[in-house]
Image: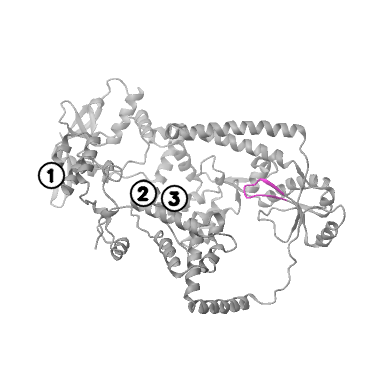
Amino acid sequence: MAIRLFIDSEGVRIMKHKAIELDPRKLVVSEQYQARKTASQTPLPQLADSIATVGLLHALAVVKSKKRGFHEVIAGGRRLQAIHHLLEDGRWPEGQLVAGNLYDEEDALLVSITENVQREQMHPADEFEAFAELIGQGKTIEDVAAAFGVTATVVRRRLQLGRVAPALMQAYRDNELPLDALMAYAMTDNQERQVQVYSNLNMWDRKSPRVIRGMIEEAMTANHRLVHFIGLDAYQAAGGGVTRDLFADEDDLNGIYLIDRALVDRLALSKLQETAANLTTQGWAWVEVTLDSEPVSNRYGRVYPEQVDLMPEQEAAIDLLQIQEKSLMHDIAILEDEEEKADEDEWQAFNQRLDELQEQIRVIENQCEAYTDSQKNVAGCIVRLDYQGLLDIVEGLIRPEDRAQAQEQQQDAEGVGRVSLPAVKTRPTHSERLVRQLTANKTAIVQAALANNPNVALAVLVAQLARRHYGAGYYRHGGFGLGISTSCEPLAADAPDFPQSRAGQELARIEQHWGDVITPGSDGGELAWALSQDTETLLELLAYLVAVTVQGIQHQESSQSSTLDQLAGLLDVQIPEWWSATGETYLSHVSKDRLVEVVSEGASPEQAAPLVRMKKTEAIEAAEQALAGTGWLPSIMVLKD
């Protein structure tokens, strides 16, 4: 018999336990006495590997189970799960028992809490030293990972802490540096440089991984668009050096730093110049190369390619691709009709193939456009990279200094085809500040005039709201100078029964009526129509346009009165005149117990009693009949004061 001392508020308490050996197949994790509710961060397979390598180092704490011959684990539940994992894999030796400490039930929860609270995680610096010592004894990284129940990546990262200067390691042990900052210092093997950076930074920046990396290496990562373009191998072949963030994953390009930024620029420009040389041989007047990825300035004019006929083989290729496209779209439609039965991976593969076919068609169709020699004589190209590092050639640009030549050629018999030339920039007559001042006064004048003409104000308001409601596409966002907008809740999306409801049908009727009456148009048709109407007609339409903006959808039940309730009170709304509880609107969406409760409340307990013995579908029908005409409402639908 062993004892454990536990000091509580009343002094020292003795908890006795007995060391026993147990069959792991007759052990279960206690639900009643397990203090640890949050899952551990250590993956179960890694813990199993650790136990398989070095054995179970700590006995399990158990109590007797109510099930004869079984015990419940009150501390060590994950160790037990790992052992069961080994049993399933066939890696647990046949007949091997598990060491356990048997406690009385009265001490079970206290033992579970104590085991979990008093357990202290090994400090990463200590892990580094332990890992390094094992590696020095001939163990492999995988051996160490299995023994400690961690991944090989964790072992490698801890071992790289050996690159850190002793002074920084001590600062880490003294909690003066966080682990991610220590990792940043480990970017370089030069410990003098590490200490120098640490000493030159203030107390806040010396803890910032971003600042530390910027001080140690002023370099771009392998994920930069220029590196994507030239290739990391080409950079290194040209003598470019790299450093690696050894705490980043091996395939993480952001963890690879290129030291020689100038070399990257030279290689990228050289590669772009090869493309530029090819364009020059095609007859363009000029070709510029840039590493800038910003959009081409609007200071350039443009010439546009002329249409040319496709070759017979190109037309045949498009016909074949379009047949494949049509067949693929048919297959996609079938998959989408199957809804839940559709295979998501198959659907994505089909859509990816469709995109590829459409891109092939687009490429061939683009070949029916070409720049003429006269266009190339006056225009040029810019060769650059997009933001992903892909080659981007902008053709047909006219420089400001070539504007006159382009205009002259445009007037020749041969011409240069379609030309777009930006307006010549001239100094404005008025400064921006004066423009704002004058237009502010102009706005105030119109406001004052409108404020004194309520008929026009009403017409403009109704016209703008009507355009927002009935207009289509981009056109509906236009207006008549008012800073007024509306927002409508998608009622049918949340209430599938809404279109068939009395309120839904009434709103649809009014919607259709005004849709037939109003004269829309991009030339201000709504306003012309509104100005020709009498006040009563405008007020009727305004009432509808305001009504459909009413907000009131809730996501949780509440007993508090809402603005929707207040508005309903102003209108003296009687909900039972518009809505009743039917199978579709309410009863089929609640449990059978709730049906019994509803009928008892809305009709009578006597009518509710038979529902208990009915099937759900029968109970719904019976409940609907019992509630008909009673005016019963669920609490959500009741208007609150």
Q: Position of residue 228 (x, y in %)?
A: 64, 44
Foreground residue, 341 or 165?
341
Residue 605 marker: 1
Residue 498 marker: 2
To which residue does mark 3 refer? 179
Q: Secondary structure at mark 1?
A: helix
Q: Quick one: label 3 or label 1, which is nearer the N terminus?
A: 3
Instruction: Name which residue type carries label 1.
Output: Pro
Tell whether 510 sits left or right of 349.
left
Q: Is residue 602 above or below residue 311?
A: below
Residue bounds of the magenta highlight: 383-393
Q: Is residue 92 above or below residue 329?
A: above
Dot 1 alpha-carbon crowd within 10 angstroms: few under 14, some 14 to 19, many 20 or more: some
Foreground residue, 578 or 376?
578
Foreground residue, 632 or 593?
632
Magenta-span inclusion, residue 391: yes
Dot 3 alpha-carbon crowd within 10 angstroms: few under 14, some 14 to 19, many 20 or more: some
